[in-house]
Amino acid sequence: MQRDKFFREIENVRHPNEKLIKTHCSYCGMQCGMNLRVNTMTNKIIGVEPRYDWPVTVGKMCPKGVTAYQQTNHKDRILRPLIRDDASLKGTKEGFREASWEEAYDLIAKKFTEMQATYGKDTLSVFSGVSMTNEKCYLTGKFARVALGTRYIDYNGRFCMSSAAGGFLRSFGVDRGSTLPWTDIHETDCLFIAGSNTAECHPTSMFRVWHVQERGGYIIVVDPRETPVARRADLHLDLKPGTDLALANGILHLLIENGYADENFIHEHTNGFEETKELVKEFTPEYTSLLTGVAPEKIIKAAEIYGKAPNAVVMFARGIEQQHKGVDNVSAYTNMALVTGKIGRPKSGVATFTGQGNGQGGREHGQKSDLLPGYRKLTNPKHVEEVSKVWGIKPEEMPKPGVSAYEMFELMNDKTIRGLYLLCSNPAVSAPNLNVVRKALKSLDFMVCADFYLSESAEFADVILPSVTWSEDEGTVTNLEGRIIKINKAQEPIGESKPDWQMQVELAERLGRGKYFSHLQTAKDVADEFRFASKGGYADYYGATWDKIDKQDGVFWPCKDENDKGTPHMFLDKKFYHPDGKAKICALPYRPPAEEPCKEYPLRLTTGRVVYHYLSGNQTRRIQFLKDMCPEPYVEVHPETAAKYEMVHDERVRLYTRRGESIYKVKITEAIRKDTVFVPYHFGHEASINLLTIAALDPMSRMPEFKACAAQMQKLEPKKVL
Amino acid sequence: MKKRLYIELENCIGCRSCLAACTQCGGHEQRNRNYVYDVNPHVSRQTMPLMCLHCENPACARSCPAQAIQIHETGAVLSALVEKCIGCQNCTIACPYGIPKFDEEENLMYKCDLCIDRTKDGIPPMCASVCPSNTLQWLTEEEIERKQQQYDLDNGKWVTSMPYLEGATNVKVNLPGILQGTEKLF
């Protein structure tokens, strides 16, 4: 099924004494298919072979994917639990000693119990991530609420997908990252891509993206930088960071003004049009240009192309979402599809490029401070009752909603939270305003970190539990299309490492909560309970059995029962998920970034990824090939700006904001706005750009504004020659 | 059906996945054998791969005094035979594209062999298998013919094995500029 023009029947190379385990990449939301090569004599992973028969990516992989297998048997793996007795060494790599699982569990259980007895249940917190299977994400939510009984659980999706989720919920009443399968992308006539460095962050989308142009279609890219996809785009709208809402309103105004609105669709299937039409009236091309810095004729041209296109897909990513109006940006760009009726049919729709491997599934099943499995809400008594029943607890035992990721660090600093169980995330690099975050981690009375490498965040822990890589466990993830896929186990866990779900079951037993967890002895056990827990929620996975996933090349949710094949295209019946079945066109007044440039801080700082690294870099910075290609961060500066500051290429300069500073090598390039500088965020310790970023949070999604703040640069004092 | 490596330079996004994948071919001893260049890094993010073109009459093999560079029946110009290579580096100088690399420690030349372990059985080479942007493709003669017709612009923009390359090559290259002649849908 879904075999398109890029699909080829190709036999894999098979070497003697080797087997191929079909699975997916450990990194981004593309979840490219791959085969891991396993030596049948040593039973170790030794390499990678393309998975030509995976319909989404047909064997293609980026350099992270090609080298992903090198994580498993890497020399930096943590092989046994580590305990640090001297708390004064927190924030360093020093002082850890190896311990048995028994000792580590005993210590954690003792500390957690004592702390909760003294300070109450909510003194503990869980900070999680979505680069792991649905089963693990699901169980982590249950672990926090049933084993620890704390309200404070949240996850790194707050730094990634939460604005997309918020925007889709408001516009459609449902949050599935893409309304259409990726196998439609190359067949559309216009791709409108905002705030996505697609070629570097989701490279295996690119053969489909380029094909749109090869067919005579159009690519429009909105980005302050001329990224590799912007370089070849038909139209590059080079806006000031943090001004997307104005641009989206400006384009919507022209779409309405010039007759591209689909009156019938608007009338039958949406609410909010008249109000929105009124609001966007003031966003003339001239006014929009004034706010965004994009030439009026480019705005007019973009609206014309998108308006005329028989089919079009609006796509976006963290560029528009990591703003303190990220949710509004998502709804504003989604307005374009709703007003023109380019949604709810093949080859047209709206999609976000999911950042993390399981960014979609991981946000649906109860790791978020206010959500329960199946995208149920903690504030809805009926939802609480449904999940309590599955978990075997009384509804009144269910903890209340907590706070978002960054806000948890604030609560650590004021001692509301004194204990932390951290897994699958590295907030000491990836969170904004890191001076505050690192202080919070250091201030904790007791911190546990489960990871397979000693991350920058693990340096703050009292106990480190060795978890497994993705290749040593099995389970499902949900890719950026909303397709549930299967990760397969290629090798036994190395050393004494264990999957996160197993640690949580064993810890729950130590904490006297075994009766809610002890029946979960395999990843499959967790999967079965998880499917059941999601049943009846709108992110319904009940019918997505492992067997069906294998047979169908994945299952798109919602998938309600055994006979349901899943839902590749959303809204084909033009029914949206709000109670009246209509989508919402949103009237969204413009507001500037939280921190605008000023005399003292005249530059706009924006951050992002490079193709060689993933998230905080805890994994990719250890892979030799990737490290060789991009060993350190840099600041991208336009040559005219560099000349003004009298800076030359490769010179080290001080970059600073109101919150922090760091030193970076200057990389001179014309492929960036003159008023903007860019630094990649994958690096730790003093090289982290997040020391400088602002924690201005979106009021709905609680997403920090990573993408825009005010900064200044300074030449370093010349070194004295002795 | 004979397939060839086809390079669509306009598509390159500079991810260097081809280089990472090169190290994964069974016979490549974890060393990558080709190149990706930033065309003009201070100006734009344009990049281009420089792969061995597998010349029909390869200068590297012609220049080898030890006949260490063999040409496979598929047309692939192989890496130096370990037992024959004398480490003179003539090939690295003779190749007009600077493809052969030299291992100082082993005193041995090594170069792209078009993943001969794969391509001898019709399986695409690692670089073209993984290339996320379809810069590197593994195509039949007919598919390449169609590309040539599609992009035959002013009879000269399409440059495969033109005289100013080193004669005819097994790998076909399409220079940047493909979009200039594309007819827009609307």
Image (spheres, coloured by chain):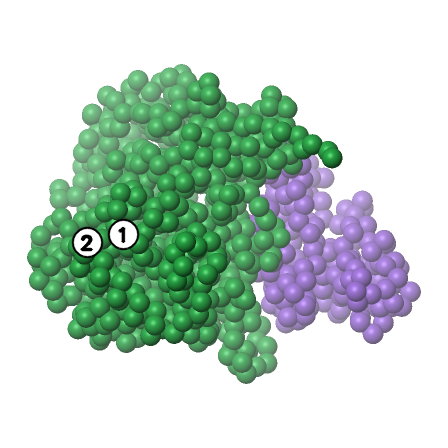
Chain colours: A green, B purple
- What is the crowding at mark 2: few (fewer than 14 residues within 10 Å), some, or many (at least 20)? some
Residue drawn at 39 percent across, 56 percent down: A87
Residue drawn at 39 percent across, 46 percent down: A438
Q: Chain of mark 1?
A: A
Horizontal arrangement in the rendering, residue A408 relative to residue A455 (left or right): left
Query: Measured from the top left, where is residue A553 in percent x and y?
Result: 38, 65
- Evaluate whether label 1 is on the same chain as label 2: yes
Closer to the chain start, of discs 1 and 2, is 2
- On screen, residue B181 above or below B16: above
Residue linked to disc 1: A418
Q: Quadrant of residue A659?
A: top left
**What amino acid is at disc 1?**
Arg
Q: Is residue A462 visible?
A: yes
**What amino acid is at disc 2?**
Tyr
Residue drawn at 24 percent across, 55 percent down: A124
Residue linked to disc 2: A119
Cα distance between the residues tagged 1 and 2: 9 Å
Residue drawn at 15 percent across, 66 percent down: A390
Query: Measured from the top left, where is residue A228 in percent x and y?
Result: 55, 40
Q: Outermost residue toward the right? A: B65
Return the residue nearer the eye: A410 or A590.
A410
Horizontal arrangement in the rendering, residue B41 relative to residue A599 (left or right): right
- Give yes or no for contact between labels 1 and 2 (Cβ–Cβ under 8 Å): yes
Q: Chain of mark 2?
A: A
Q: Is residue A489 visible?
A: no
Horizontal arrangement in the rendering, residue A3 relative to residue A528 (left or right): right
Horizontal arrangement in the rendering, residue A119 relative to residue A321 (left or right): left
Query: Measured from the top left, where is residue A325 in percent x and y?
Result: 31, 33
Query: Measured from the top left, where is residue B152 in percent x and y?
Result: 65, 42
The quadrant of the image that shows the C terminus of chain A is top right
